[in-house]
Amino acid sequence: MRHLLLALPFALLPVIAHADEHHHHDHHDEHASLGSHEHGVAQLDAALEGTVLEIELRSPAINLLGFEHAANSAEDKRKVADARAQLEQPGRLFGLSAEAGCKLDEARLESPLFAGKGHEHEHEHEHEHEHEHEHEQHDAGTHSDVHAHYRYDCSTPDALTGLDLRALFEAFPGTEKIQAQVIGPNGQQGKLLRAKQAQITF
């Protein structure tokens, strides 16, 4: 399943390029959001295959926390804890249809600002490699990102018509745009989402 998510950024480039032709005013912003650390912009990849739904969210930490430095003050630590708590309860953030019966099987959060508190079901070697990379980025004083990965098992996947990210925009108002890319029963597509246009279908 993970190979579908890994392929998404490359498979959907032609789709996104085509969408750009119809949104000239967003031309620069949409391309800048692909594979880059841009404040206010996040990326979301989702793949629905059979009963399994996988979602990956990648965002600059400032979108979710309001800052990117290590949390030293009590206020900053509270913001980290609050953001983490919301990310650990993703059902509301993605607007999954209750009729689809999707149960969360795995939730994994990764960020240097989470102080290495990685989540369960992660291969040890992969876990160590990713956190080494995160610490290298953090030590070098570069931008901090948050990477969240979720896997659901859906008893009635036909009832899952898409994702609705309005609650995610509400929870994290520092997020202005989300470049969403999905693979589902109807093929693949990419769409630039905003708070007032926050739905994408499978």
Image (tube, grey):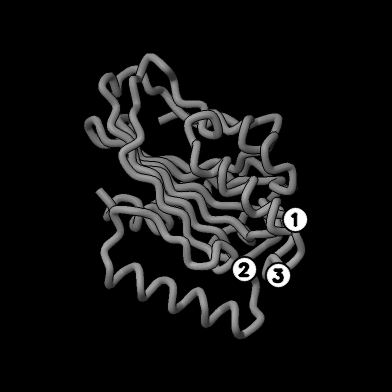
Query: Splitting the image into 4 quarters, where does residue 185 fall?
Result: top left
Q: Tell me the amino acid under the disc marked 3.
A: His
The residue lying toward the viewer, choosing from 44 and 184, is 44
Per the model, the C-alpha gap separating discs 3 and 1 is 10 Å
* Mark 3 and mark 2 residues within 8 Å of each other at the beta carbon: yes
How many residues crowd mark 1 within 10 Å: few (<14), some (14–19), many (20+)?
some
The residue lying toward the viewer, choosing from 161 and 100, is 100
Q: Tell me the amino acid under the disc marked 2.
A: Ser
Farthest-out residue, left: 50
Q: Which mark is residue 55?
A: none
Q: Which residue is mark 1?
A: 66
Q: Which residue is mark 3?
A: 69
The number of numbered discs placed on residues in the rendered structure image is: 3
* Mark 3 and mark 1 residues within 8 Å of each other at the beta carbon: no
Per the model, the C-alpha gap separating discs 3 and 2 is 8 Å
Identify which residue is drawn at 53% across, 55% down.
58
